[in-house]
Image: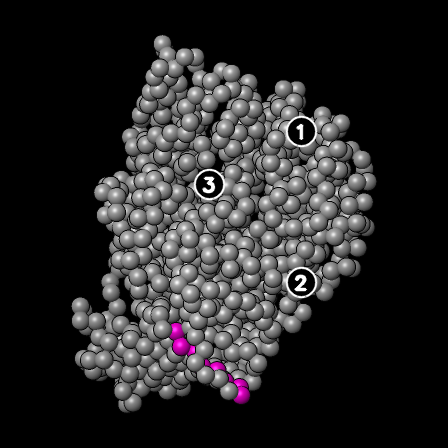
Amino acid sequence: MSDAASETIYLKDYTEPHHWVRDVHLTFRLAPKATRVLSRITFVPNAENGGDLILNGEELTLITATVDGAIVPMEVSDTHLRIKSADLPQKPFTFEAEVEIAPEDNTALEGLYMSNGMYCTQCEAEGFRKITYYPDRPDVMATFTVRAEGDYPVLLSNGNPVASGDGWAEWHDPWPKPAYLFALVAGDLVNHAGSFTTKSGKDVELNIYVRKGDEDKCAFGMQALKDAMAWDEKTYGREYDLDIFNIVAVDDFNMGAMENKGLNVFNSSCVLASQATSTDANFERIEGIIAHEYFHNWTGNRITCRDWFQLCLKEGLTVYRDQMFSGDMRSHPVKRIEEVLTLRARQFREDNGPLAHPVRPASFVEINNFYTATVYEKGAEIIGMLRRLVGDEAYRKGCDLYFERHDGQAVTIEDWLKAFEDATGRDLSHFAQWYSQAGTPRLTMSEEWTDGTLTLTFAQSTPPTPGQDEKNPQVIPIAVGLIGPNGDEVLPTTVLEMTEAEQSFTFEGLGARPVASVLRDFSAPVILQRDMDAATRAFLLAHDTDPFQKWEMGRMLSKDTLINMITSSGTPAADYLDALKTVLSDESLDPAFRALVLGLPSQDDLAQTLFDAGQTPDPQKIYEAREALRRALARHMSDILPTLFRQHETPQFKPDADGSGKRALRLSVLSLLTLLDDGEAARTLFAAADNMTEQEGSLQALLAAGLGTDELQAFEKQWKEDRLVMDKWFMMQVAFAAPDTAAATAEALTRHPAFTMKNPNRFRAVFGALTSNHAGFHHDSGAAYDLLAKNLISLDKLNPQTTARMSAAFETWRRYDSVRQAKIRAQLDRMLATDGLSRDTTEMVTRILGG
Ligand code: TRP
Ligand code: ZN
């Protein structure tokens, strides 16, 4: 690898470009092995600095290039085309070029590539440079006109359609945008059409384009899109701004979806939905991602990022917006618990390991490696904290000012915060540190009770993270409530604003000593450490009015029980089992909530908890304790399980909050029941299920009990033609394999005729499942480490982005014993020693090793 390719880029080095772009005309002559891209770009010298014209360009064959129609001297390297200032007009000029690219050979799925015979593009973050020479940076915004030529029934690009004929189509996007939002799609596709009338009365044509045969899986996504459009008008006052909005489903895609202006491109798994093929979790995710990409139209597209360090400006805010949308569409309490589960599983894990970085990183080698849980999920938490601190009305005022002030601009986090300072008169300089300081704050709390006064004293500290040894106190909004001894709430939710390393808050005039409910609604992304006995937890589990804290108390009881079983071979206390049973049979509680309370902490979560407590986690012991607890729960609840299972049948499938909640409870119950009835109920449901939620759920219950071999075969036979359902088939077997067979199961599946390295969904199905099977991945033999490294090395040659992303499975290596550590290190060293390892993967592995 050349030095230039692994150069570190720093936020502090940002400078404006030497040239701005006014407009861009592109013509694509499409051919799988030799597509010609003709560009005509109007450049305007940046009066601020002058200088050479610097264009990015990678993997391009240059045919011709001119300035104002004349050939001028230019330097062309593997990464750039450069024209000296002296050879350029000192006024606006036209740069024209023709290049050739080979979309069919593009397995990295970045730039212009082919998937099942269709052409599609992925340009974020820096993929446009693989299409033509261009200043591929988000602060250069321009209007685009695109002509696509090729013998395909569907030819799409950004903006509005201008004209079309036999084998060609022209599109014009009137809104200036950076190149990363460019998109082009061509192929033999069918569309599911719809329409939306905006609040000012403009009719917008909506389309979801899919492969033939998938037309019947578009209706749900179309409705989600309309709901999202209406929600953004109502909640943020944001209206859509083109005549047409297109979505395209693509099978081969590195991530979930992409917000290209007017032409969103989706991983087919994130848009195609039907009762027979999609689970409730799929429906919920599809609704959320469609909204997410749509919401980017304002938070990301109309207002974009000045540079890639500002990624959280669009991602954190847009995730926050899609979370609120989903809460409004379904249930806020359930959604909040699900958000916290993912935040802890992914972001806390990242923040507590070698890949920890600030929400706005200060440097990077490969920006694709920073589309992380920290940027997205912690970025969203920051917006939530900001809103809690300023209040709902001021939050809306701040957003309005931001939209008004920065429409059409490429801006920074400072600009975002300044809009809130100006709208609210509040000083946000301390709060801004959430963007620059990495690591998860630990918050400890102690209590004092004297003469009717309760004093809560908090202390905060953040452990060191790579490159940041010293940490400062953060601004932490702590939502608290007080519950009286009789179970009534004596103080409704109040937000305490902590700013110091240590701080006390008092509550006076209380008749009897209450129990404090702290960090309600998970008001800050911190780890709260608080001495609390099991009886107090059970009290809050029974009486807290805050659904998040109510759930949290059940979770902490489960976690304490498991930790005790792991470290002292203890058995679950009867009080604990009774408390869970009471929640499970409480019909006043939402079934979805009850299912969440019944969910046990993951093995990975337990490993991290043990590590934080100074112990070395033993994956096999963790696995066994969790299985033992499942059996104990099943036995303790054996009298209520069959009834609960029957009660929550949903005769008519509807993928809404109510139906999915009932099925979630029903399937968690089934998973316990299967440990008692030798799989009878699960087999019956599997045979009768008319929806994928129950078909998959019953099969998983069987697999988790070591059963289900015949059903697995039947499943394959039924679904072998459906790629998305087959991903579930691949995934399930590995996810539920016993620790000693997980690696062998995954290995055997890589030899299945339907396995392919070229499809990221399929690769993730097998290897994502392997790495999430905690005891299987960390099995003594080291076989899973070896298998993963071997396959990542092969994938890296085809698709560096997905390889780098998946190498993060090794990020927790320091938690484990020295033998496992040595085994993982050996695999990481083996990856680094591979000839031609990509910049993406090299950066990840190096950071994981702590280099
Ligand atoms: N901006 C996309 C989002 O909505 C994510 C994204 C970034 C992406 N890079 C990508 C998607 C590469 C697919 C491929 O969050
Ligand atoms: Zn996004």
According to the picture, the residue beneath numbered tag 1 turns out to be 585
- Say whether disc 1 or disc 3 marks the residue closer to the N-terminus: 3
- Does residue 349 show up? no
The kind of residue on which mark 3 rests is Phe
**SS category of the residue bearing label 1:** loop
According to the picture, the residue beneath numbered tag 3 turns out to be 348
Tag count: 3
Q: As drawn, is 583 to the left or to the right of 159?
A: right
Which picture quadrant has residue 774?
top right
Residue 616, magenta (yes or no) = no
Question: Looking at the image, which is closer to me, 491 or 774?
Answer: 491
Q: As drawn, is 241 to the left or to the right of 801?
A: left
Identity of the residue drawn at 51% across and 74% down: 185
Question: Looking at the image, which is closer to me, 33 or 216?
Answer: 216
Q: Position of residue 124 (x, y in %)?
A: 43, 64
- Where are the magenta residues, as a range? 166-173
Q: Can you say whether 490 is above or below 759 in the image?
A: above
In this rendering, which labeled residue sits more in front, label 1 or label 3? 1
Identity of the residue drawn at 43% across and 75% down: 160
According to the picture, the residue beneath numbered tag 2 turns out to be 723
Q: Can you say whether 805 is above or below 87 in the image?
A: above
- Say whether disc 1 or disc 2 marks the residue closer to the N-terminus: 1
Q: As drawn, is 323 to the left or to the right of 625?
A: left
Q: CA distance from mark 3 to mark 2?
A: 32 Å
Q: Position of residue 350 (x, y in %)?
A: 46, 44
